[in-house]
């Protein structure tokens, strides 16, 4: 018998009436104490904690700062409206240094040390790719706002989602017809020599070919490069359009040197605004961009046809009509991407409420509930526009804006349709075990 | 583009790199030559120069040239002051111990970098060039300002050389470099010379940064590349040798420009690093460095 010493044999002990009363009183007192009450309800009212993997330092720091601002605004809006399933939302922020190895450490830290409910955040594709395995190992849902095709490629794992921003492959496919019809058919690509650039390198040529255009040269530039003139002689003379997607702190130099090289007799320019996120379009040396075109996820400058939701979103995040911080015209935002943080947090809210999410034990349910989502209607929760979501490849698809630089502002001249950017799924995450 | 113009462009680009590199590396070389301190924070003084140039030029309104000239004077002075304080508070207390100062300057590197991130922010910010004249060649356009950087750097190098060889200050510095104890015995205030040299070294980096900042923007991480290249230059040229530093800077800058244009930038870096390795194996004192005394 296990109870050798008879500890549980009540017949041996004499439980006096006084002792019994004391015990009952103490128990009642404990139950009435405020701390105890809160503890007993921890499952239902403790805040939902979202681990935010942020580019606070490193080459993505400008993005990180605005991703934090946007996410803080979204969390405030969600909490003001009652939180997620009545629970408050709390962001726990860790710096990933815009570094893949550090990114994976941060995901581990969220899962093991902070014990957050999910991980959310980061932009740079190499950090996402580096961090995704850690999310899979810890079985913690990882919602990224990265724009790259890596999530939709189904090369990552079942715990990684990108429900707030369209991936590059879809963006390119939806814009290629416009480029071929309006800018030119002979295209030279200049892109950063890492994952995000490779998405452009791989998906533009077929998309353009389908429109009768051709990529005649591809120039890869190391992401840490600080001077660019030496690459320009590689641009063939017959180039009609230069397609540029540089990122990082040296992009201004890139554009300026391109301007010095070509002067006014330049080919058409089509760029991803990634090149100039957080940079004032009226910076000295950028006059050269006047008349050129840019992709924008969400327009930086307020447009005449902005929806009420877009206006409310801009006010909540604190950006003015020029896309700069309210009160500091020099503090230009990363408007084309950061809307994805806002929208992703609302997707998380929807999926958690659908799943009846209670705590980390429900993470698998959350994954399935996210995969079950089909579309997001345009509105306060999705101010950039309507989106569809493919649960098999964990990727959303939305509209894209093509904007022209005119009089020192970016003016939207073309909006693509969601259908333009749809492609055959390359795999299916839902077949992977949870 | 044909071979001729292509080579010309490569050479021009290489010259600009060389010019800035020569100034930066000279600062590093001077500090090592005189003080025997390997200043790992040198790149951060460079960055600080660029960041302060941005601060000064945005604070001053009017023609961009006024702001730029002000930055060219004020930024290096402020950086010199920071270096002076760092020398007093850190290096002197370590008695300029070679190992100790390496670790201490690594610490300074991070402190300066993070302070810049905190107070200046993560953005790359542009400084308007004092003039924006575009030289129109038959094959391509080229920035007139870039060429003026080469000229300015050449003038500064000549001035530094004149100061070192023709003035009393230069004599004192050379004496301290040659033999610290004997110099002290002859009444040279060695500690004051050290402080001055450390400040001047940082100021040279800051001047280089102010010159380059209208071309490539001020950013808190911009000090890393110049530091690495400066070390390469100083090792090839010979630590403490002004002539070696300049020659090596031109060599590295030009080869970087030409190789990266005709082949790939990665190959240029590979070759530069390989040259460093070869120099260290076959001529450890550098191309122009004096043999051990």
Image (cartoon, helix red, strand yellow):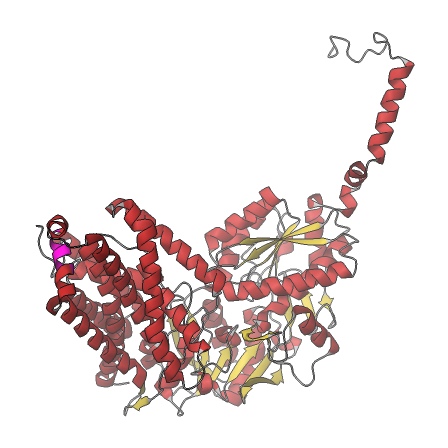
Magenta span has A179? Answer: no
Residue A230: image quadrant is bottom left
Vertical relation: A57 (above or below) B54:
above
* Residue A211 visible to the viewer: no
Q: Considering depth in this image, is B223 or A355 the residue closer to the camera?
A: B223
* Residue A228 visible to the viewer: yes
Residue A426: x percent and y percent?
A: 57, 63
Range drawn in magenta: B173-179
Q: How many marks?
A: 0
Vertical relation: A80 (above or below) A297:
above
Vertical relation: B166 (above or below) A281:
above
In this picture, residue B279 sits left or right of residue B128: left
In this picture, residue A182 sits left or right of residue B15: right
| Residue ID at (29%, 60%) | B228
| Residue ID at (25%, 45%) | B97
Residue A365: x percent and y percent?
A: 72, 49
Residue A160: x percent and y percent?
A: 60, 56
| Residue ID at (78%, 47%) | A45
Vertical relation: A215 (above or below) B92:
below
Quarter holding the N terminus of chain A?
Answer: top right
**Residue reaching furthest front?**
B187
Q: Considering depth in this image, is B111 or A133 the residue closer to the camera?
A: B111
**Residue reaching furthest right?**
A17
Residue B23: image quadrant is bottom left
In this picture, residue A13 sits left or right of residue B276: right
Q: Considering depth in this image, is B34 or A40 the residue closer to the camera?
A: B34
Q: Considering depth in this image, is A434 or A62 the residue closer to the camera?
A: A62
Q: Main secondary structure of the magenta part?
A: helix
């Amino acid at each position: 018998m296990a109870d050798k010493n008879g500890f549980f044999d009540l017949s041996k002990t004499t439980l006096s009436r006084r002792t019994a009363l004391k015990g009952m009183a103490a128990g009642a007192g404990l139950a009435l104490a405020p701390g105890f009450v809160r503890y007993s309800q921890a499952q239902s009212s403790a805040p939902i904690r979202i681990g935010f993997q942020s580019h606070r330092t490193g080459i993505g720091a400008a993005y990180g700062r605005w991703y934090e601002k946007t996410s803080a605004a979204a969390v405030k809006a969600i909490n003001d409206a009652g939180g997620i399933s009545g629970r408050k939302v709390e962001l726990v922020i860790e710096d990933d240094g815009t570094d893949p190895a550090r990114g994976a450490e941060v995901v581990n830290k969220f899962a093991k040390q902070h014990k957050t409910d999910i991980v959310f955040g980061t932009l740079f594709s190499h950090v996402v790719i580096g961090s995704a395995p850690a999310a899979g190992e810890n079985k913690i849902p990882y919602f990224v706002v990265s724009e790259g095709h890596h999530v939709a490629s189904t090369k990552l794992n079942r715990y990684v989602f990108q429900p707030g921003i369209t991936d590059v492959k879809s963006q390119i496919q939806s814009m290629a017809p416009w480029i071929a019809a309006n800018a030119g058919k002979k295209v030279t690509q200049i892109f950063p020599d890492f994952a995000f650039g490779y998405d452009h390198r791989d998906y533009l040529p077929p998309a353009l070919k389908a429109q009768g255009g051709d990529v005649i040269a591809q120039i890869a530039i190391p992401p840490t490069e600080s001077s660019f003139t030496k690459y320009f002689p590689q641009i063939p003379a017959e180039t009609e359009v230069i397609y540029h997607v540089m990122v990082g702190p040296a992009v201004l130099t890139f554009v300026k040197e391109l301007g010095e090289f070509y002067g006014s007799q330049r080919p058409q320019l089509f760029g991803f605004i990634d090149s100039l996120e957080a940079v004032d379009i009226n910076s000295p040396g950028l006059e050269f961009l006047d008349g050129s075109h840019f992709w924008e996820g969400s327009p930086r400058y307020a447009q005449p046809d902005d929806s009420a939701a877009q206006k409310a979103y801009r006010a909540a995040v604190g950006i003015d009509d020029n896309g700069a911080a309210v009160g500091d015209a020099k503090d230009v935002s990363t408007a084309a991407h950061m809307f994805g943080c806002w929208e992703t947090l609302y997707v998380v809210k929807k999926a958690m409420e659908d799943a009846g999410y209670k705590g980390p034990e429900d993470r698998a349910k959350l994954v399935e509930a996210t995969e079950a989502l089909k579309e997001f209607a345009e509105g306060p929760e999705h101010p950039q526009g309507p989106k569809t979501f493919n649960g098999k490849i964990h990727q959303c698809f939305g509209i894209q804006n093509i904007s022209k630089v005119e009089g020192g502002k970016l003016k939207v001249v073309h909006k693509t349709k969601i259908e333009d950017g749809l492609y055959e799924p390359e795999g299916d995450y839902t077949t992977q075990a949870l | 583009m044909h071979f001729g113009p292509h080579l010309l462009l490569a050479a021009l680009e290489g010259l600009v790199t060389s010019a800035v590199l020569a100034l930066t590396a000279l600062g590093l070389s001077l500090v090592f030559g005189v003080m025997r301190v390997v200043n790992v924070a040198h790149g951060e003084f460079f960055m600080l120069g660029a960041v302060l140039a941005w601060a000064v030029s945005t604070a001053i309104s009017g023609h961009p040239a006024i702001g730029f000239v002000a930055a060219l004077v004020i930024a290096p002075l402020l950086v010199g002051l920071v270096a002076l304080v760092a020398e007093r508070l850190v290096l002197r207390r370590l008695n300029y111990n070679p190992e100790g100062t390496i670790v201490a300057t690594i610490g300074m590197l991070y402190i300066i970098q993070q302070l810049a991130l905190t107070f200046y922010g993560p953005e790359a910010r542009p400084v308007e060039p004092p003039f924006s004249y575009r030289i129109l060649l038959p094959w391509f356009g080229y920035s007139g300002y870039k060429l003026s950087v080469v000229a300015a750097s050449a003038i500064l190098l000549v001035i530094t050389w004149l100061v070192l060889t023709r003035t009393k200050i230069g004599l004192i510095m050379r004496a301290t470099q040659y033999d610290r104890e004997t110099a002290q015995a002859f009444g040279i205030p060695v500690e004051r010379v050290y402080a001055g040299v450390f400040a001047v070294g940082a100021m040279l980096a800051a001047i280089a940064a102010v010159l380059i900042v209208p071309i490539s923007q001020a950013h808190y991480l911009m000090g890393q590349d110049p530091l690495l290249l400066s070390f390469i230059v100083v090792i090839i040229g010979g630590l403490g040798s002004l002539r070696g530093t300049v020659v090596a800077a031109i060599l590295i800058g030009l080869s970087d420009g030409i190789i990266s244009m005709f082949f790939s930038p990665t190959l240029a870096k590979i070759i530069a690093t390989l040259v460093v390795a070869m120099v260290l194996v076959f001529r450890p004192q550098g191309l122009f460095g004096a043999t051990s005394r």
